Amino acid sequence: MNDFLAVIYLICFAAIAGGAFALMTQSLRGASQPLRPSRHPEAPQAGEPVMYVDLNRERLEQLYQEVS
């Protein structure tokens, strides 16, 4: 029975060690490749108008005066 458990242990140890080695090599391979700049899918196209909120001090004071 002890020989059977030793074989099972060695098989599991080899599987974990192999998985760790594969993960390490993929991480190193990915880190050595240059990053490709990606464009966000919701980014505006060139020349497309962009909506924004103007929150400068003068605009906020004007809005505060309108409410009061």
Image (cartoon, rainbow, N blue to C red):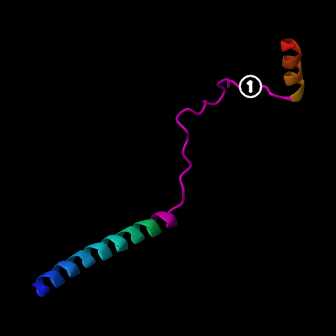
Q: Which residue is mark 1?
A: 53
Is 10 positioned to the left or the right of 53 in the image?
left
- The reply, left or right, for residue 24 in relation to residue 13 is right
Q: Is the N terminus in the top left, top right, bottom left or bottom right quadrant?
A: bottom left
Measuring from the top left, give residue 18's x and y in whole percent. Answer: 30, 74
Residue 15 point in image, percent of width and height: 26, 73
- Above or below, 21 relative to 41: below
Viewed as shown, does residue 49 lie left or right of 63? left
Q: Quadrant of residue 16?
A: bottom left
| Extreme-front residue of the structure | 1
Q: Say what amino acid the circle numbered 1 marks.
A: Val
Question: What residue appears at the point 17 percent right and 78 percent down from the top-left corner?
Answer: 8
* Residue 51, image x, y percentages: 68, 24
User: In terms of secondary structure, what is the magenta stretch mainly?
Assistant: loop
Instruction: Assign a secondary structure to mark 1.
Output: loop
Residue 34 coordinates in the image, percent (x, y) = 54, 60
Who is closer to the viewer here, 27 or 68? 68
Q: Which residues are magenta?
A: 30-56
